[in-house]
Amino acid sequence: MRTVELVCSAGLDAAVRAAWDGLAAAGLPSLARNLHPTNRPHLTLAAVDDFPPGAERRLADLFDAALPLPARVDRVAVLDGSAPLVWLLRSTPELLALHGAVWDVLAGAPGARPWHLPGRWVPHLSLALRFRDADRRRARAVVGGDRPAGEFVGARSYDGDARVVTPLGGRDVGDGPAGPRCVDRGPGRPAQR
């Protein structure tokens, strides 16, 4: 699987990480517990089995022209009742246009994940996976009052098979200690470029 993701400015990234840490400290599920070197706050625009030929270059050109893009967090929600705990993002015409343009580039890509398609996509920053709706009140008490703002400053793609992150434009989107092309080499072995 290949994703297309936007990464956050330093301030917005720090705010999301602080929310992750607050959830973990409260004993709630949190992405703070995901120690993979590529784990960082991001907005997923698309996920497909593989990119069509030439898509990486076209996406990079698109993001170089469109970023930075303002980002404003809205309320805390649990998607689908018992799934990810997220901070919803306020949709803007610019964000929706960029999302549509990404899917124009990916037209015909195999294995398009339907929840990312235009008309079905819910822009959000994930805070925890497999979160119970019953814990939403506690989560709101931990992070719900915050409404951070910032920008999306870069784009990347995560290859779930190779476990590699590839920059796709905008500012440098270095991921973790190994930098922008981080590969997970398995348990007990350091990530390498």
Image (cartoon, rainbow, N blue to C red):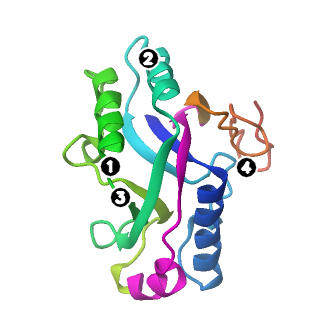
Mark 1 falls on what kind of element? loop
Q: Find the magenta span and give its range.
A: 135-163
Q: Residue at x 48, y 81 (%)?
A: 145
| For residue 70, above or below residue 156 | below
When asked about the image quadrant of residue 19, the answer is bottom right
Residue furthest to the top in view is: 53
Label 1 amino acid? Thr
Q: Residue at x 25, y 21 (%)?
A: 108
Q: Is-magenta flag for residue 146?
A: yes
Measure how far apart labels 1 and 2 are at the Cα level. Answer: 22 Å
Quadrant of the rendering where the N terminus is positioned: top left
Residue identifier under label 3: 90
Label 2 amino acid? Arg
Residue identifier under label 1: 92
Residue identifier under label 2: 58
Residue identifier under label 4: 187
Q: Nearer the viewer, mark 2 or mark 3?
A: 3
In this figure, what is the number of numbered marks?
4
Badge 1 local density, few (<14 within 10 Å), some, or many (20+)?
few
User: Closer to the camera, 92 or 111?
Assistant: 92
Quadrant of the rendering where the C terminus is positioned: top right
Is mark 1 in CB contact (under 8 Å) with mark 3? yes
Mark 4 falls on what kind of element? loop
Is mark 2 in CB contact (under 8 Å) with mark 4? no
Q: Earlier in the sequence, mark 3 or mark 4?
A: 3
